[in-house]
Amino acid sequence: MSAKNSCATLRKKFFVYLAAAFGAVLTTSIYSFVDTVVVGQYEGGTGIAAISCVNPVWNLFIGFGLLFGIGGSVMFSVSRGKGDTRASNEYFTASLIAVTSVAVVLYVLFLTLKKQLLALFGAGGDELVLEKALDYAGYIAYVMPLFILGSYFSAFIRNDGSPLTATIAVVSGGAFNIFGDVFFVFGLDMGIGGAGLATMLGQILSFCIMLTYFFRKKCTLRLALPHRFFRLAFSAARGGFAPFIVDFSFGILVILFNNRIMELGGSTELGVFGAVSTTVLLIQVLFYGVGQALQPLASFAYGASDMRSLKKLLKYALLTAAGMSVLFCVLALAMPGALIHVYIGLPTESELATGAYAFRALSVCLLLMGANITLSYYFQSVLRVGVSVLISVLRGLGLCSSLLYALTAAFGIGAVWWVMPVAETATAVIAFALLAAVKIRPKNAPEKGEGEDA
């Protein structure tokens, strides 16, 4: 095959994975976005504030699914790239045991401490917000393990060469959630509790469809007795720590933002933040899609020492992320008022003014977010885990947590909307400097500390 044809084939394969990844990563955002919009139209800003206090639960639970799913599947793909099928199956089995154990523990903790956790997440300062948050989380609590396992299986199915399967599962669950939200919230007049019921049923449907993959002939995922289980589980967790810290830190940040906003402002500002954070989550997971389309192909190329393909894949991913970033930035700048109306049916003048300012500030964040996330996935794919984690930590808790208190202390509550833009800008400068400094050599090259952080 000529170099030109090979390049075209690789590009086509990347975009096939990209299309499938967009569907697979929309699990959280579809449910959260649709629920926020429908509840906002029914309940107003108070309902959105309540959902904002539940959203960290999504991030914390799904983050653990990514920890073992993305990490285990990276090692799975690298092993397959080297032709070691036995090792790839051991990584699948070890990470499955680990993620299931974590899911059970978190499930019990959330059912036991649901009210206390929601109060801690920002709902404690307003009784009405707490009441609505409990109504929404009441149904979802029973299927929380499915969100962990769903994100785990999605990663492995994609790395097993079937990226469309997870997409079909997520789109089916998301479509049910959309119609279910309208039916339960408005049709049966259940309010915010109806949105929780629709989300629960949608996730059950999505998970069941995903399970059907394991009964197909195309599936090559096999259980194998993992020798040195803890070593394999640790390697999987280490490889998935970067995407885990992104979701985990976003959940923690939402908690910090919720509490800081309630301290300096009130439910109006918290409702606007709920709209902004839901938009950030929706767009962020689309950038995850770019990274997750890159990851299995890049990991396989790295395992096979195909450095030419690896460089081309990174180029495709960065250009795709850049195009998306410009589009999202322009939309946030051009129509902030329309975005507020999407979330809140009849916004007050205060909500409109605050929301317009918040979304315009957010445009800077959206312009740089894609490159940061893509580079984090790239370094993870080539086993430069330390670099990947550094980028993820910087754009998350590393900078945002300190900026949240420093900027608001100096400039008041209006500065809360500039925390993420400043953090993304600083992270982008560091991330591209690392891209230039860290040298990626073929996997089988005789270098010291092979496979470790540069």
Image (cartoon, rainbow, N blue to C red):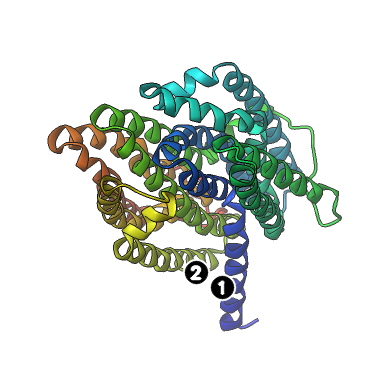
For the point 39% across and 67% down, the residue is 327
Q: Position of residue 126 (x, y in %)?
A: 38, 24
Label 2: few (<14), some (14–19) or many (≥20) C-alpha neighbours in 10 Å: some
- Between disc 2 and disc 1, whose residue precedes? 1
Where is 202 relative to 432, above or below? above
Residue 322 lies in what quarter of the image?
Answer: bottom left
Q: Which residue is mark 1?
A: 11
The percent coordinates of residue 194 (x first, y second) are 61, 38
| Residue name at image x 30 percent, y 66 percent | 334
- Disc 2 residue type (three-letter): Lys
Image position of 202 with respect to 402: above or below:
below
In this view, the residue in front, 128 or 236, is 128
Front position among marks 2 and 1: 1
> Residue at position x 42%, y 51% from top?
345
**What amino acid is at disc 1?**
Arg
- Say if residue 452 shows up in the picture: no
Q: Are marks 2 and 1 in contact (CB under 8 Å)?
A: yes
Where disc 1 sits, the SS reads helix
Observer-nearest of 221 and 253: 253
User: Which numbered circle lies on residue 171?
Assistant: none
Left or right, 80 with respect to 119, comes to right
